[in-house]
Amino acid sequence: MRPIFWFRRSASSMWRLAALGGCVGFLVGWGAKTALATAPSPPVRIIRSVPVSAKVVALTFDDGPSPQYTPQILQLLQQYGAKATFFVVGQQLVRYPAIAREEYQDGMELGNHGFRHLSLIGMDPTAIEAEVKPVEQEITAITGQRPTLYRLPQGKGDAVANRTLADMGYTVIYWNVDTRDYLESRPPY
């Protein structure tokens, strides 16, 4: 299975580019703000599955870290030499950063699942950023890398959520097999 790489020019590099071209842009009737305002937005990336030639599965786990379940999952993954992506909820991450650190040290990927596990439907971009950014900062502090994957809580989002997440540099990850474990009683975090 080949990895997928996404390229996104950061906002800070756009500002540097605009600052360098500001004088030239002004002479031809463009200011730096106009150049930035007309810069294309990054594409909205939504992944439900990835075509591959080998028989593989991508394991994902949502809503942790959990002191009760995450260590058990990590033990099983290690036993079978498997890797997974853990989409962490910020409230849990703040409570159990050592468990998230263990996930990362075991070679797992940490994805963003929102701070309070809220549906992003109907939220404006500022509210979405307030829900996403704190988790991003916590994951970055643990891993040294900014997360690029976002799982919509309950799989619910809208065009504004998708556009805002893309502008923040995220790829939205859905699933194509649902265990429906959420129909069972929720774990008492």
Image (spheres, rainbow, N blue to C red):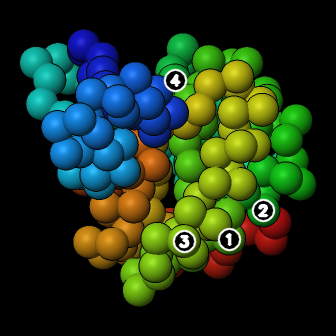
**Vertical arrangement, residue 139 with respect to residue 162, above or below:** above
Q: Amino acid at mark 4?
A: Lys
Residue 19: x %, y % from top left: 44, 30
Q: Which residue is mark 4?
A: 83
- Camera-side residue of 15 and 123: 15
What residue appears at the point 64 percent right and 66 percent down from the top-left corner? 130
Location of the C terminus by quadrant is bottom right
Q: Which mark is residue 126?
A: 3
- Assess disc 2: are there few (<14), some (14-19) or many (≥20) residues with their C-alpha within 10 Å of its C-alpha: some
| Marked residue nearer the N-terminal end (4 or 3) | 4
What residue appears at the point 25 percent right and 15 percent down from the top-left corner? 1
Q: Which residue is mark 2?
A: 91
Q: Amino acid at mark 1?
A: Arg
Q: Quadrant of residue 8?
A: top left
**Vertical arrangement, residue 82 with respect to residue 37, above or below:** above
- Assess disc 4: are there few (<14), some (14-19) or many (≥20) residues with their C-alpha within 10 Å of its C-alpha: some
Q: Amino acid at mark 3?
A: Thr
**Closer to viewer: mark 4 or mark 3:** 3
- Label 3 element class: helix
| Residues at marks 1 and 3, CA–CA distance in whole angstroms | 15 Å
Q: Which residue is mark 1?
A: 116
Q: Do the CB atoms of the residues marked 1 and 3 lie less than 8 Å apart?
A: no
**Closer to viewer: mark 1 or mark 3:** 3
- Label 1 element class: loop
